[in-house]
Image: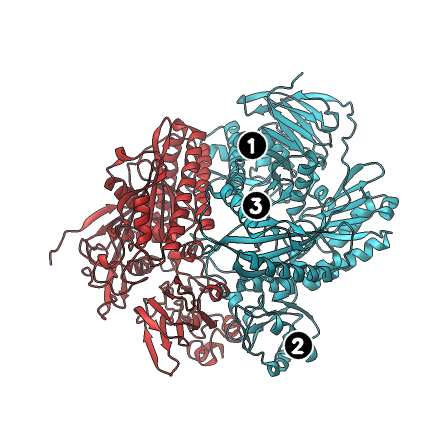
Chain colours: A red, B cyan
């Protein structure tokens, strides 16, 4: 296999421009841009057809300037936030470059090595024109479409990208404001659930247009001579915020270590490391030591490698602010082509998100080696994506649904972990059980916090959850679960937590355990058990406050046996 | 007409307004809130400001209170136990898995209102269609009662899965809990809401159980106090979803009042819009710490069906009032990256803005306004004399940090605060597919009139209506709160004629449930209905008002579909060819209070002076006239500062102002036409 030299990526685009924009107007412009992104998000959520959009929020909406720098992103899926710039650049290049763009155009693009995702994550890009100034920026949405004709509705076992869905290589879905019917029909024709995809495609068009109108309004309100300097100053501000944080981290090189359970096709563990280098306020994340690209779909294309890096860094150093391009300027990422974090076509990448999630935890693991109390211990470390599909008994209608599930969060110096979705999906909500029962053929038998699933410590991790679903019709199920073989780690002496797991119990009593499985045919009356992992503990457990141990016992988060084992000082 | 008294309890002040039908006049008063015994604060205000003969002849007492809300915020309520379906006691704690602050790695979920050890399970299960999957384990109830009693639980929330579709198990469990000796209050999830989404419904039920005892005893004490003072009319309290309800009903359904704080203003806005015949009005309620905005279309505030309070969802109607942390007390500072920021932190009542001279040293928007002369010479009605030097010093500190002079910084503080308020207003209108430019602006609250022109300029609005008693407008709005009851049921079915027959049956049930809730039989009773509709496959959809004849639908499915599509087209710009389905059916009883006749008070001659203030349109200090509101009659041109007892109105050059026919002031762009 050919080996490549590492490639250095600056995480932010465009040159840094010094401006003298005043700190007052800049703040006004920043507000207006964030508000415009919110309007776009709202339009998408209210009109979408798929629960993956309106409930799981498996999308990102953002505004970019004409140089494809992030102006604002509405609260949506953080994992997508670093990838939309790639989508815009690639989509625009593929339709013939900026010169080929006209007002009212909407581009469709989903080539995984350019979007960073699997093909289901379809990007829609709309150039925004001002009558006088010409092109001023772009609105972009990348959202998960429930099915676009991969080998299965969701896959954990693909061996090349062509099994993963229809490819839209950057085409005009709308030209000068009119839908291009031929393209539209091609999209719909390639889905197992055409109505849902059609609905979501329309919703996305509504939203990129709403964003375009909103961005244009902001631009026109301030005028080019005020708007552009303020935008530059906004980026410079974002950069200063992040750099101040890293100034406080001691210079040095820190290696974070992680491990993936398997690649979905071959069952062997895949250890990997990410090296964090801090020099002053400059941060480098080096993935060049990664294992080779895998024969199963857990390869993470470059845009998502950058995104994972950006998410980890801006969550840590962004002081809770919504991100913009400037926040990424302190960051450099190094990857080596043909490896896990830089696969080349046609390497399969359906589960690209799973190594990306692990990378975030591993980056925090590296930070903890510099400053242990700067980060939490490992969380359950996965989104436990489960998807279901089939044909409804009676009507014969095709259907599909899917959801991520909450896990225990890692403890940190000063706080016990809670139970919520992985930080990479921090705005997402999982579906109410009663809504599921209304629309899907199963009964939830149980959803409860799992006793003793949390990592012990002076501060304990959050508990994981036990779910039990009993199917009432025959269905197909795909499960994508990581950290089933590797327990979430504790920090600073804190203990490990329960790993993730899943099993199926058939009506005849047979049982089957799995973590990654595609199109498992499940008969009616089988019971699916999903055990989501806990969060790792922080600090030595013999320093846990006795009152807290007693409260945990009383509330049943831990059993007496567990308490006696980890907290003997409380007895 | 009908004489009425309104009292609104805020964090700092208890505001009173009363309307006397004999004179057609409305009067106001203000006393400090008594946090330890809020009802005493209310009774004190009534005693102080309302003559005994008015108390005796008043037909209505209308009340707005944050008693329930504060109980929640401060976690001072009942010790609540929860009875859950076996396997689901953690719904309340697992929530929906999201984070309120998405970029905060260390965000912690709020403590559940009921701790885990007080959430006990009963074996039972109902399915989504109401069928019984597993029967209720009746024998187990006795041991639950023992445990709850041993723990000293005050009240119980019964929260069963799918109880919205079939309440039989919740009802039976309540009966058995009583039989076995539980004597506290019992809340049941299906009584609170017949809508799906278990976390939202259970959260609301827990809130109900948590505040109920406190709320009902408070209302009882208040009513007794009023009766003791000679009042013999009807006591009503504001609902979160607009309108008002009787004290008796609020004691049973306290969660319906929990988000009623900002509703008085929206209610008043609706009344003003109807009385002045304004199609589209947008409110701007600027208080000390928060800014609230609501849209009034065709004289009605917009109502949503799920809200959130103190980080907990409430599955109940609430007026769509958007709130952001920006107000007269919002503090300006330089952030770590060097930008000037305003809010959301507020200087609060203590120490307050620097210019109030109570020890505040940080610059607030009120300091900026004072420095710019927008508040006039500075004698406020509350007795405060503005300390201009203190404002200048506070703003100066921040000005130096960002490298600007004091004037630029003060102007900047006002612009930043204005822009965040305007963004909230833009979002609430754009989401409905509407353009704020064509609307009228209704500013109120202590600092609303100070921001009115700035907001109108930012949003390119050309008409501003300043209501009567603008500084006390929430209390004023209470006086027009019609009595309202509502109930809803989730019932998903295709929109066709057959379903409409089913809908009529549901409506009949809902209306009879409403009628059974209270004492209300009034010839003026109106029945209203809404259907929540969506394209098949969507989750979200609009709630569409549908015509009724009596309590039955008076429209065909085709007519209802076109009402839906009209709304969808306006909001999203296009419609689709998909089938439409019904998601929920909503029934409302409304008894309009007798209408108030608003008369403009006679114009009084008053002293006039001039005062230098900053003109945003001219970019410099110019002389403003300073006039008392009571002296405004015919249209005059700005620049002018108009003072009244509880607020100050800033009218820049290029605007003009006149008194309207109903006691309001009307501001329009351009010079006065003479």
Q: Chain of mark 3?
A: B
Residue at disc 3, secondary structure? strand
Residue toward you, A17 or A569: A17
**Which quadrant of the view contains residue A533?**
bottom left
Q: Which residue is mark 3?
A: B323
Counting residues from the N terminus, which is met first, the one under dot 3 or under dot 1? 3
**In the displayed structure, would residue A329 be above or below residue A287?**
above
Circle 1 residues within 10 Å: few <14, some 14–19, many ≥20: some
Residue at disc 2, secondary structure? helix
Residue at disc 1, secondary structure? helix
Which label belongs to residue B438? 1
Q: Residue at x 27, y 56 (%)?
A: A165
The image position of residue B581, as x and y in percent, is: 51, 56
Q: Which mark's residue is nearer the viewer, 3 or 1?
A: 1
Which label belongs to residue B571? none
Q: Is residue B131 visible?
A: yes
Asked if residue A184 lies left or right of residue A27, the reply is left
The image position of residue A409, as x and y in percent, is: 41, 64
Whole-Å distance between the Cαs marked 3 and 2?
Answer: 41 Å
Do the residues bearing badges 3 and 1 touch, measured as CB atoms within 8 Å?
no
Q: Which residue is mark 2?
A: B177
Asked if residue A18 lies left or right of residue B549, the reply is left
**In the displayed structure, would residue B377 be above or below residue A373?**
above
The image position of residue A376, as x and y in percent, is: 39, 61
Whole-Å distance between the Cαs marked 2 and 1?
Answer: 57 Å
The image position of residue A135, as x and y in percent, is: 33, 32
């Amino acid at each position: 296999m050919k080996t490549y030299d590492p490639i250095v990526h600056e995480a932010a685009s465009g040159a840094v421009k010094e401006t003298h924009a005043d700190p007052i107007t800049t703040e006004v412009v920043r507000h207006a841009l964030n508000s415009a992104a919110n309007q776009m998000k709202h339009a998408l959520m209210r009109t979408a057809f798929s629960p993956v959009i309106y409930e799981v929020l498996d999308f990102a909406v953002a505004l970019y300037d004409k140089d494809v720098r992030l102006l604002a992103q509405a609260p949506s899926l953080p994992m997508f936030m670093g990838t939309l710039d790639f989508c815009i650049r690639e989509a625009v290049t593929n339709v013939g470059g900026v010169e080929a763009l006209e007002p009212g155009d909407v581009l469709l693009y989903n080539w995984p090595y350019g979007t960073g995702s699997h093909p289901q994550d379809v990007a829609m890009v709309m150039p925004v024109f001002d009558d006088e100034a010409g092109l001023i920026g772009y609105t972009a949405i990348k959202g998960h479409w429930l099915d676009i004709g991969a080998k299965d509705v969701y896959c954990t076992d693909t061996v090349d990208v062509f099994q993963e869905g229809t490819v839209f290589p950057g085409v005009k879905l709308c030209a000068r404001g009119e839908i291009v019917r031929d393209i539209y029909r091609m999209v719909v024709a390639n889905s197992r659930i055409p109505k849902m995809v059609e609905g979501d495609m329309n919703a996305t068009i509504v939203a990129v247009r709403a964003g375009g109108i909103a961005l244009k309004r902001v631009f026109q309100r301030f005028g080019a001579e005020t708007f552009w300097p303020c935008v530059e100053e906004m980026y410079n501000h974002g950069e200063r915020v992040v750099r101040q944080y890293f100034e406080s981290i001691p210079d040095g090189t820190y290696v974070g270590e992680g491990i993936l359970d398997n690649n979905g096709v071959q069952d062997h563990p895949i250890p990997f490391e990410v090296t964090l280098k801090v020099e002053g306020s400059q941060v480098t994340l080096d993935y060049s030591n990664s294992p080779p690209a895998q024969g199963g779909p857990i390869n993470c294309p470059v845009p998502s490698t950058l995104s994972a890096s950006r998410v980890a860094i801006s969550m840590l150093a962004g002081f809770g602010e919504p991100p913009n391009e400037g926040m990424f300027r302190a960051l450099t990422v190094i990857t080596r082509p043909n490896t896990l974090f830089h696969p080349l076509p046609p390497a399969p990448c359906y589960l690209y998100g799973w190594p990306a999630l692990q990378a975030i935890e591993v980056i925090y693991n590296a930070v903890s080696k510099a400053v242990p109390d700067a980060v939490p211990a490992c969380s359950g470390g996965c989104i436990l994506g489960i998807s279901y599909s089939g044909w409804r008994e009676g009507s014969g209608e095709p259907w599909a649904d899917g959801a991520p599930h909450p896990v225990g969060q890692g403890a940190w110096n000063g706080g016990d972990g809670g139970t919520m979705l992985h930080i990479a999906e921090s705005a997402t909500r999982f579906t109410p059980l009663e809504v599921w029962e209304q629309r899907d053929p199963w009964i939830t038998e149980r959803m409860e916090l799992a006793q003793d699933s949390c990592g012990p410590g002076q501060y304990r991790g959050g508990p994981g959850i036990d779910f039990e679903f009993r199917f009432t019709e025959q269905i197909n199920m795909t499960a994508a679960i990581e950290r089933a073989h590797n327990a979430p780690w504790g920090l600073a002496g804190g203990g490990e937590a329960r790993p993730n797991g899943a099993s199926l119990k058939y009506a005849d009593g047979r049982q089957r355990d799995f973590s990654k499985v595609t199109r498992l045919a499940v008969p009616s009356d089988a019971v699916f058990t999903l055990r989501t992992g806990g969060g790792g503990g922080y600090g030595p457990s013999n320093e846990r406050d006795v009152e807290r141990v007693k409260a945990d016992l009383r509330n049943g988060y831990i059993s007496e046996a567990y308490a006696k084992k980890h907290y003997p000082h409380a007895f | 007409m009908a004489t009425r008294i309104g009292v609104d309890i805020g964090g700092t002040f208890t505001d009173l307004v009363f309307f006397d039908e004999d004179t057609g006049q409305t009067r106001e008063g203000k006393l400090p809130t008594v946090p330890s015994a809020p009802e005493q604060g209310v009774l004190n205000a009534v005693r102080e400001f309302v003559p005994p003969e008015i108390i005796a002849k008043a037909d209505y007492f209308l009340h707005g209170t944050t008693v329930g809300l504060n109980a929640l915020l401060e976690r001072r309520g009942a010790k609540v136990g929860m009875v859950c379906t076996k396997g689901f006691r953690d719904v309340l704690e697992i929530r929906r898995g999201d984070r309120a602050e998405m970029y905060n790695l260390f965000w912690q979920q709020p403590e559940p209102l009921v701790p885990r050890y007080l959430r006990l399970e009963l074996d039972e299960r109902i399915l989504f269609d109401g069928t019984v999957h597993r029967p209720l384990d009746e024998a187990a109830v006795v041991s639950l009662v023992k445990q709850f009693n041993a723990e000293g639980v005050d009240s119980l929330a019964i929260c069963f899965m799918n109880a919205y579709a079939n309440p039989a198990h919740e009802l039976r469990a309540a009966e058995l809990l009583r039989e076995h000796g539980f004597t506290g209050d019992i809340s049941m999830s299906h009584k609170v809401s017949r809508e799906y989404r278990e976390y939202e419904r259970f959260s609301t039920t827990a809130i109900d159980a948590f505040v109920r005892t406190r709320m009902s005893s408070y209302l009882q004490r208040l009513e007794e106090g009023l009766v003791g003072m000679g009042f013999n009319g009807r006591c009503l309290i504001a609902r979160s979803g607009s309108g008002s309800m009787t004290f008796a009903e609020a004691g049973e359904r306290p969660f319906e009042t929990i988000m009623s704080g900002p509703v008085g203003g929206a209610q008043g806005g609706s009344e003003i819009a109807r009385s002045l015949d304004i199609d589209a009005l947008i409110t701007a309620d600027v208080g000390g710490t928060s800014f609230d905005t609501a849209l009034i279309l065709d004289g009605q505030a917009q109502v949503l069906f799920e809200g959130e309070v103190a980080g907990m969802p409430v599955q109940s109607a609430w007026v769509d009032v958007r709130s952001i942390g920006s107000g007269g007390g919002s503090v300006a500072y330089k952030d770590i990256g060097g930008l000037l920021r305003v809010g959301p932190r507020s200087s609060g009542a203590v120490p307050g803005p620097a210019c109030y001279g109570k020890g505040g040293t940080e610059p607030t928007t009120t300091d900026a306004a004072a420095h710019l002369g927008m508040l006039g010479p500075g004698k406020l009605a509350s007795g405060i004399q503005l300390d201009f030097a203190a404002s200048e010093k506070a703003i100066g500190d921040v000005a130096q940090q960002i490298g600007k002079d004091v004037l630029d910084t003060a102007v900047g503080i006002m612009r930043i605060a204005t822009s965040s308020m305007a963004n909230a207003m833009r979002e609430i209108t754009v989401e409905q597919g509407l353009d704020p430019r064509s609307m009228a602006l209704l500013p109120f609250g202590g600092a609303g009139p100070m921001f009115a022109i700035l907001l109108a300029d930012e949003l390119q609005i050309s008409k501003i209506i300043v209501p009567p008693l603008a500084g006390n407008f929430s209390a004023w709005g209470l006086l027009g709160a019609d009595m309202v009851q509502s109930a809803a049921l989730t019932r998903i079915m295709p929109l066709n004629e057959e379903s409409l027959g089913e809908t009529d049956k549901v409506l009949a049930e809902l209306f009879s449930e409403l009628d059974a809730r209270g004492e209300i039989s009034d010839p003026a009773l109106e029945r209203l209905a809404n259907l929540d509709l969506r394209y098949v496959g969507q989750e979200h959809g609009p709630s569409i008002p549908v015509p009724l004849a009596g309590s039955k639908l008076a429209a065909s499915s085709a007519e209802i579909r076109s009402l839906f599509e009209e709304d969808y087209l306006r909001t999203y710009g296009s419609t689709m060819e998909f089938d439409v389905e019904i998601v929920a059916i909503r029934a409302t009883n409304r008894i309009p209070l007798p209408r108030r006749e608003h008369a403009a008070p006679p114009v009084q001659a008053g002293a006039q002076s001039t005062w230098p203030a900053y003109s945003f349109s001219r970019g410099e200090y110019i002389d403003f006239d300073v006039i008392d509101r009571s002296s405004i009659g015919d249209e005059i041109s700005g620049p002018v500062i108009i003072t009244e007892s509880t607020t100050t109105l800033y009218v820049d050059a290029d605007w003009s102002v006149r008194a309207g026919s109903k006691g309001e002031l009307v501001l329009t762009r351009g010079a006065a036409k003479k």
